[in-house]
Amino acid sequence: MAKKRIRIDMEDADGARYDIKLEGNVTRDKVLKIFEMMDLMNIEEEEEKSIKMDSIGSKIWHITDKFFPMGKFTSTNILEKYEDEFNEPVKLSVISTYLSRFAAKGRVDRIRTGREWTYQSIRIAQKQQSIK
């Protein structure tokens, strides 16, 4: 098996720079821990985003970003999480329409799986390809 190497460079709102390197036996769990750490460092940005959830589209994107940052999901998965998170009903067709729009804008990847569409966040899909 080839040796895996990942390098992540980032800068926070205060201008501090971070250089994270993973080499050797890089697993999905290790990469997820790095992403969790990066999320913890961006707490202020996340709070600002949550305040601006005034439309159904922004709420659907919030659900996608919060519950499915990695891995694949369907419109039904989003429907269940949406109703749990916001305690308000929404039609499955509305969610499907927004996910289709997100795919057209390049925010999510959309693949036909049997009788339904399967989605995945584009930024994570690109990061996973660089891991391989």
Image: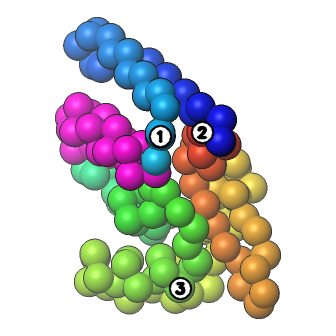
The residue sitting at 46% across, 47% down in the picture is 27
Q: Is residue 126 visible from the viewing direction of this image?
A: no
Residue 131 on the magenta segment: no
Crowding at mark 1 (Cα within 10 Å: few <14, some 14-19, many 20+): some
- State which tag comes first along the sequence, 1 or 2: 1
Would you name the residue on which mark 1 appears?
Answer: 26
Would you name the residue on which mark 3 appears?
Answer: 76
Q: Nearer the viewer, mark 1 or mark 2?
A: 1
- The answer to whether the residue labelled 1 contacts the one labelled 2, judged by CB atoms less than 8 Å apart, is yes
Disc 2 marks a residue whose amino acid type is Ile
Residue 45 on the magenta segment: yes
Q: Position of residue 8 (x, y in %)?
A: 46, 24
* Residue in front for this viewpoint, 68 or 129: 129
Please provide the residue range marked out in magenta. 28-49
- The structure's colour scheme is rainbow
Q: Position of residue 66 (x, y in %)?
A: 36, 59
Disc 1 marks a residue whose amino acid type is Val
Residue 85 drawn above or below residue 34: below
The residue sitting at 65% across, 35% down in the picture is 2
Q: Nearer the viewer, mark 2 or mark 3?
A: 2
**Quarter occupied by the C terminus:** top right
* SS for callout 1: loop
Would you name the residue on which mark 2 appears?
Answer: 131
* SS for callout 2: helix
